[in-house]
Amino acid sequence: MYLDSQGDNRLEIILIDDSKDTSQAFGHQIMSLSELIGMELKSFPFTIAISDPSARKEKSVQLTKIGGKPVSLISNEATIYSDVKYGEGLIVMPGARISANVVLGSYVHVNFNSYIAHDVIVSDFVTFSPGVNCGGGVSIGREAFIGMGATIIQSTFSRIVDIGDKSVVGMGANVIKSVDAGKVVIGNPAREYLKD
Ligand SMILES: CC(C)(COP(=O)(O)OP(=O)(O)OC[C@H]1O[C@@H](n2cnc3c(N)ncnc32)[C@H](O)[C@@H]1OP(=O)(O)O)[C@@H](O)C(=O)NCCC(=O)NCCS
């Protein structure tokens, strides 16, 4: 989160981490969520770096309840077409490329070097891990997690590709058809992964 501690528009960055084993990182103070709550701030901007979609959702609810206002962080080393629409709390990392007419929901993560082709619709809390390639016209459901280096084939008029809510596309998977909500898929071509 970013805190105007001086009341003069100077911003202080504070990292919130409940599993902290140190009080500083990257030169910034770390505090727990309960310490933040104890500060009784009226309002503060925040962004959430947690890659797990459901944990990110939970934190977004907690932080907005105590006065947090989500902000988006978009690297100036990312390439984003001017007509891309996005919700609040978006993070786009260096090397990401987002093509024309893409819609990104709230709290979406687009990690290093991920590519999202034209006309893709990405719902809230979706995570693109580093190096994902997502073909045009695909829809990605809420809280889906796309693993490192996964590739998702484009939709066509005869084959619509939907990645379901809360599904997981494993690292390196090559997805050539829709994935049902809540399923985990791995491999080439990607198939459902059933844990014993
Ligand atoms: C698919 C995934 C969610 C499964 O997680 P898991 O249930 O903990 O899986 P395990 O590590 O217990 O592996 C179970 C089996 O699946 C295989 N497996 C796991 N992930 C695989 C993948 N992505 N592709 C192919 N096989 C995979 C393992 O080799 C193992 O096989 P075995 O039983 O023959 O030994 C996970 O491996 C994955 O790909 N996560 C994404 C990671 C990622 O991209 N993180 C972002 C970091 S920035």
Image (cartoon, rainbow, N blue to C red):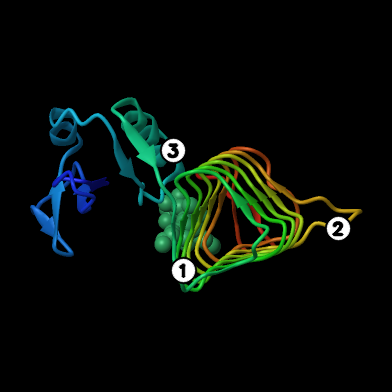
Residue at the image position 8 percent from the left and 52 percent from the top: 23
Within 8 Å of ligand 1, the CB of disc 2?
no
Residue 27 at what x, y percent from top left?
Answer: 14, 63
User: Which sits in the foreground, 58 or 92?
Assistant: 92
State the CA–CA distance, disc 2 to disc 3.
30 Å
Residue 82 at what x, y percent from top left?
Answer: 64, 62
State the CA–CA distance, disc 1 to disc 3.
21 Å
State the CA–CA distance, disc 2 to disc 1.
27 Å
**Which corner quadrant of the image does residue 79 belong to?**
bottom right
Local SS, label 3: helix
10 Å neighbourhood of mark 2: few (<14), some, or many (≥20)? few
Residue at the image position 51 percent from the left and 70 percent from the top: 78
Tell me the kind of residue under disc 3. Answer: Ser
Above or below residue 138? Residue 79 is below
Q: Which residue is mark 2?
A: 156
Within 8 Å of ligand 1, the CB of disc 3?
no
Mark 1–mark 3 contact, CB under 8 Å? no
Local SS, label 2: loop
Q: Is residue 58 left or right of residue 139?
A: left
- State the residue lying farthest toward the right: 158
Tell me the kind of residue under disc 2. Answer: Thr
User: Which sits in the foreground, 182 or 137?
Assistant: 137
10 Å neighbourhood of mark 1: few (<14), some, or many (≥20)? many
Q: Which residue is mark 3?
A: 54
Mark nearer the viewer, 2 or 1: 1
Q: Which residue is mark 1?
A: 112
Of the residues under marks 2 and 3, which one precedes in the sequence? 3
